[in-house]
Image: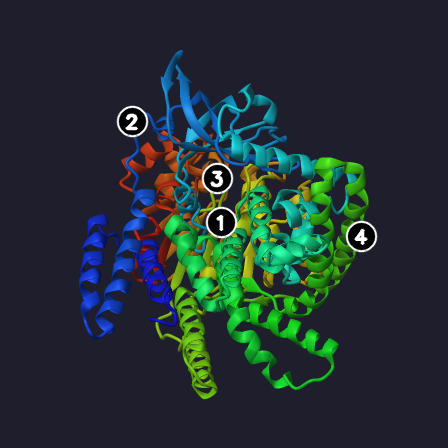
């Protein structure tokens, strides 16, 4: 407690926050004050143990009460979220933080002031996240703007492995969103209404970024990320290469960047002050230079957007500077825990920001593990070799401690960063950052003088990019089954290595931790009861169904996607992360019912992300660029293709029977229409699941002529519940007990149609919908079946 005074409070606060975040455990605020009073009373006890426990409990309760205002806010009657679902309204408010600007799109937070609806102007309050689909919004913090849009409440799709977008916004006190088609649709009412200080920093950053972009049109995006924290100008391909090379952190303003900048400022000030002989005699130049370093570093903090990693770095630099000025020894762990405690006290939800987590873990690993890794080489005499080994040790330490968290967040991690950092840190950290930072003040004074420095920094970035593109070829390590238990074990392992004295004790803890992590991922024993599990994935206004066959083989029917193509990559954001989180590492049978974007687009990313055994399609002629691309990717992998139609005889795969029913020579479609969708029954014992694609009434009319082949237990309702499908004759012929509709929440098509729902309800069919229930799972044994939904927590 005396050696690590901030550790117990930090662990208590983190524990309470995690209990609240993961298990919805909430405490009333007064309970924290009660625990604090109890802790104060224990100060006079002779033993320190009760006090330590009481302090930890106090901070635990504090953490457990800190998230309730964000997760369960008491919204006022004028809150802008009250207009969700009310149709388009005119919203006016003030931009209250730095907009996230990108070359062709952007987003910004708006503090709502008023809403114009039905020719009435009403007061409004609350924060609104505004997404601009096209164009750059030339606004700054403090500007009053007006636009027309629909207000919506943030929502999650309800699919395994999904990023909790709703909670992410809630932790920023945002409970409503709006989408604007074009930046030109936003009217600037008045500039600089409020937030003058933040506006100054935002305007300065925008001006500096524009100058950097003019001098360096090719590498300017990376320089803007390095120097100003603006990652929106880095291309997706280059950012992916940095991630695969394990140096994605270099694109953020990390503690390393700030430390280098602080060192440059300190050395420059020391050199400048030493030129004045009288000052040398009257003041302590080193202590004065140390204190004088803090204001420009703090200025740079706000200029770069005050990201969590930057805030942590500045706090630590301030503590270390103050300690050196007071001639006190500093313990890196104490400084790190104090900075973390201060940040979490000021903003508790930041614990769940991935940049906060990786920043602190990387620095913690550097402090604890770097000495361990470099210990065998401590007697080396060659200074250059020793420095290279030290850099490798530091890189390995940061990579190791962030390996599992990165795998948990992104389903993959890379060890290429251990090598990459040896090249990139000197080029980008000591080179481009120093040259670029030196150019920033010159830009404000004389941009011409800053030009050569920007060009030098750009040249160093260009060299780094070439190296990164080469190192990005090293394949990442797939980590698709990292759990919270893994993260907890790794955290406790690092904590043990930090606190335990003695080399043997640390080796023992490391061994126990490695064994525990290995035991958590031992292959499960094969079960004796083979089941058919059909998981209707909630992928928005699209369709994708995962089928786990009785023998363990995996089938995927369609992959979802945007209705009109483009937009969010459903495969990357929803489909593949869901499959990974469910333990699916390969697809044995990939089935495409028809090549429309809302069934096909998600498969493009999947085809590149995991192995495919066979590809099934109708083989109907279709002029479709996405289908051609999917076929090309599968051909490149040597994936065999099977064409299915009504003429295909029933066959068995994975212990279940496939009965193709459509298309046939009577198909009314023209090769790529909904009525050319693949229709088939999946049969196990007495249970049948009917997949219908997007067929409409004409195809249904033909199929209804043979009720014996059409009858099913579970019906995948055609065309997302369109009123032009699920005709009465078809439903009577199929006679399902359960109907599943895949539709996007608040979709613009009004699906499922009320007419379709009415027809299903009139026949007593149980209806499940992905827009309402999230992902839906049907488990069949052949003799019985049961349905579970993600929304109700009955999903397995």
- The residue pinned by badge 3 equals 541
Instruction: Between residue 437 and residue 43, name the one nearer to us.
Output: 43
652, above or below 140, in the image: below
Q: CA distance from mark 1 to mark 3?
A: 10 Å
Residue 321 in percent (x, y) is at: 53, 59
Q: Residue at x 77, y 37 (%)?
A: 447
Q: Earlier in the sequence, mark 2 or mark 4?
A: 2
Image quadrant of residue 338? bottom left
Query: Quick check: 324 left or right of 128?
Result: right
- The residue pinned by badge 2 equals 77
Residue 365 in percent (x, y) is at: 52, 69
Residue 559 in percent (x, y) is at: 53, 49
Image quadrant of residue 182? top right
Q: Could you say whether the residue bearing mark 4 is in a helix, strand or loop? A: helix
59, above or below 716, in the image: below
Which mark is on residue 459? 4
């Amino acid at each position: 407690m005396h050696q690590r005074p901030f550790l117990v409070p930090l662990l208590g606060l983190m524990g309470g926050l995690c209990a609240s975040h993961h298990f919805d455990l909430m405490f009333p605020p007064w309970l924290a004050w009660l625990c604090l009073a109890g802790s104060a009373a224990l100060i006079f006890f002779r033993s320190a143990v009760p006090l330590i426990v009481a302090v930890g409990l106090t901070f635990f309760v504090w953490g457990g009460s800190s998230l309730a205002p964000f997760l369960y806010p008491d919204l006022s009657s004028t809150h802008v979220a009250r207009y969700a679902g009310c149709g388009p309204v005119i919203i006016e408010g003030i931009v209250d933080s730095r907009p996230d600007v990108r070359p062709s799109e952007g987003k910004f937070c708006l503090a709502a002031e008023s809403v114009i609806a039905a020719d009435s102007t009403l007061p409004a309050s609350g924060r609104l996240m505004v997404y601009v689909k096209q164009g750059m919004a030339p606004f700054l913090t403090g500007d009053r703007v007006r636009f027309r849009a629909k207000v919506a409440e943030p929502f999650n799709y309800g699919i395994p492995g999904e990023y909790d977008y709703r909670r992410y916004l809630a932790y920023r006190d945002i409970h409503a969103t709006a989408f604007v088609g074009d930046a030109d649709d936003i009217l600037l009412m008045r500039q600089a209404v409020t937030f003058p200080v933040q506006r100054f920093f935002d305007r300065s950053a925008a001006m500096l970024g524009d100058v950097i972009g003019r001098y360096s049109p090719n590498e300017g995006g990376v320089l803007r990320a390095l120097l100003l924290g603006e990652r929106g100008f880095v291309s997706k391909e280059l950012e992916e290469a940095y991630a695969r090379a394990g140096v994605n952190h270099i694109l953020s303003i990390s503690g390393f960047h700030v430390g280098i900048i602080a060192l440059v400022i300190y050395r420059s000030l020391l050199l400048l002050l030493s030129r004045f002989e009288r000052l040398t005699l009257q003041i302590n130049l080193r202590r004065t230079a140390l204190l004088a370093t803090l204001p420009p570093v703090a200025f740079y903090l706000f200029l770069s957007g005050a990201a969590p990693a930057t805030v942590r770095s500045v706090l630590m630099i301030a503590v270390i500077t103050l300690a050196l000025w007071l001639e006190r020894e500093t313990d890196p762990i104490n400084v790190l825990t104090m900075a973390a405690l201060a940040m979490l006290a000021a903003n508790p939800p930041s614990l769940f920001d991935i940049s906060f987590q990786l920043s602190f873990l990387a620095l913690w690993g550097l402090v604890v593990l770097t000495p361990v890794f470099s210990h065998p080489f401590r007697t080396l005499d060659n200074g250059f070799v020793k420095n290279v080994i030290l850099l490798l040790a530091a890189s390995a330490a940061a990579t190791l401690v962030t390996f599992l968290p990165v795998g948990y967040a992104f389903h993959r991690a890379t060890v290429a960063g251990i090598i990459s950092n040896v090249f990139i840190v000197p080029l980008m950290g000591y080179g481009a950052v120093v040259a670029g930072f030196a150019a920033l003040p010159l830009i404000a004074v004389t941009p011409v003088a800053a030009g050569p420095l920007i060009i030098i920094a750009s040249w160093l970035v260009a060299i780094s990019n070439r190296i990164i593109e080469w190192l990005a070829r090293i394949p990442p390590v797939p980590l698709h089954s990292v759990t919270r238990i893994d993260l907890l074990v790794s955290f406790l392992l690092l904590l043990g290595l930090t606190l335990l004295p003695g080399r043997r004790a640390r080796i023992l803890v490391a061994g126990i931790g490695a064994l525990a992590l290995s035991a958590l991922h031992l292959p499960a024993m094969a079960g004796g009861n083979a089941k058919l599990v059909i998981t209707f994935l909630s992928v928005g206004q699209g369709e994708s169904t995962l089928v786990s066959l009785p023998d363990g083989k995996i089938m995927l029917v369609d992959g979802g996607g945007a209705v009109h193509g483009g937009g969010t990559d459903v495969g990357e954001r929803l489909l593949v992360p869901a499959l990974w989180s469910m333990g699916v590492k390969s697809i044995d049978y990939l089935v495409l019912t028809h090549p429309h974007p809302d069934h096909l687009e998600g498969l493009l990313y999947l085809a590149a992300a995991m192995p495919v055994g066979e590809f099934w399609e109708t083989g109907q002629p279709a002029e479709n660029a996405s289908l051609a691309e999917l076929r090309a990717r599968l051909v490149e992998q040597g994936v065999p293709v099977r064409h299915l139609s009504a003429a295909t005889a029933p066959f068995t795969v994975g212990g279940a029977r496939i009965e193709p029913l459509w298309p046939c020579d009577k198909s009314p479609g023209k090769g790529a229409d909904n009525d050319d969708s693949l229709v088939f029954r999946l049969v196990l014992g007495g249970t049948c699941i009917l997949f219908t694609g997007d067929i409409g009434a004409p195809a249904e009319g033909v199929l209804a002529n043979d009720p014996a082949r059409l009858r099913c237990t579970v019906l995948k309702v055609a065309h997302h519940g369109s009123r032009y499908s699920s005709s009465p004759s078809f439903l009577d012929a199929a006679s399902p007990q359960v109907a599943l509709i895949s539709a996007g929440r608040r979709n613009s098509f009004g699906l499922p149609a009320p007419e379709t729902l009415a027809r299903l309800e009139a026949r007593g069919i149980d209806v499940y919908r992905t827009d309402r229930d999230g992902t839906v799972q049907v488990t069949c044994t052949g003799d019985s079946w049961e349905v579970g939904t993600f929304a109700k927590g009955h999903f397995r």
